[in-house]
Image: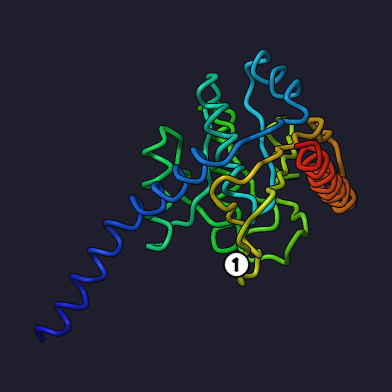
Amino acid sequence: MSKILSRENKKKFTKSIAPYLVKFLLNTIWRTCRVVKIQGSHYLDQLVADDKPFIPVYWHQHHVYGSYLMLKLKKRGVNIGFLISPSADGDMSAKIAKSWGTVAIRGSSTRTGAKALRDLYLAITKDRISPVNTSDGPTGPLHVFKPGAIMLAQLSQSKLVPVSYAASRYWQLGSWDKFIIPKPFSRIVINVGKPVSIDKTLPESEQQQACLLLQGMLKKLQLSSEKILRKKVQAN
């Protein structure tokens, strides 16, 4: 019995300290790495000036500097939200999101798809939240744009804003998303694409075409980020 209690206490301790460790890691990366360029920053300037909710979209593997950019936007008055799993595993991410002053929208596009879509729609239309969409998450396939963001943009009439980045040095995990963790003191290029509007009358049969459009945009943004970064590195 004492061994079982000991295991439970260890789990509780791990869960309680994990958010602080993750935040420490992120802050270390953000403080030591240098963002040498934010390509397409004028799109962000216009979105901030418009003062309307929008939907940032990036690949699941790009959370580290995707989140960095979202926090920069929050400081400019954008009400940022993150869709986070309602399971116990999502509790850590929810704690981190709340500690940043962002909104944790608890839901899953796979387990509670319709409810999650409804909650995101209400977050945009009622609470004026701009919810992040990791468009190949939460389980992949890698770099395949799923229709959830298209449907949300269509219903809410909010613009989709594609975001990508490249790091000069990074670790890449063996997970399905090949998650990228920039190494400290790396150089970073963030690339923001032209916002995309989805017509409210877009038929369901054409949603896949819209997915392919955004998928192609994210790929081009990634390649462009890498090209800009190579030039920056070579110039120094």
Residue drawn at x 69%, y 52% as measured from the top left:
59
Classify residue 97 as left or right of residue 52.
left
Residue 4 point in image, percent of width and height: 17, 83
Residue 101 point in image, percent of width and height: 41, 32
User: Among all residues in the image, which is located at the extreme front?
Assistant: 236
Residue drawn at x 21%, y 78% as measured from the top left:
7
User: Among all residues in the image, which is located at the extreme left?
Assistant: 2
User: Is 120 in front, or is 196?
Assistant: 196
Quadrant showing the C terminus: top right
User: Among all residues in the image, which is located at the extreme top?
Assistant: 49
Residue drawn at x 82%, y 30% as measured from the top left:
194
Question: Disc 1 on helix, strand or loop?
Answer: loop
Q: Mark 1 points at which residue?
A: 173
124 w.r.t. 179: above or below: above
Give neighbour class at mark 1: few <14, some 14-19, many 20+ (Cα, 10 Å).
few
Classify residue 119 as left or right of residue 96.
right
Classify residue 189 as left or right of residue 170.
right
Snapshot quadrant of residue 228: top right
User: Is 86 in front, or is 96?
Assistant: 96
Quadrant showing the N terminus: bottom left
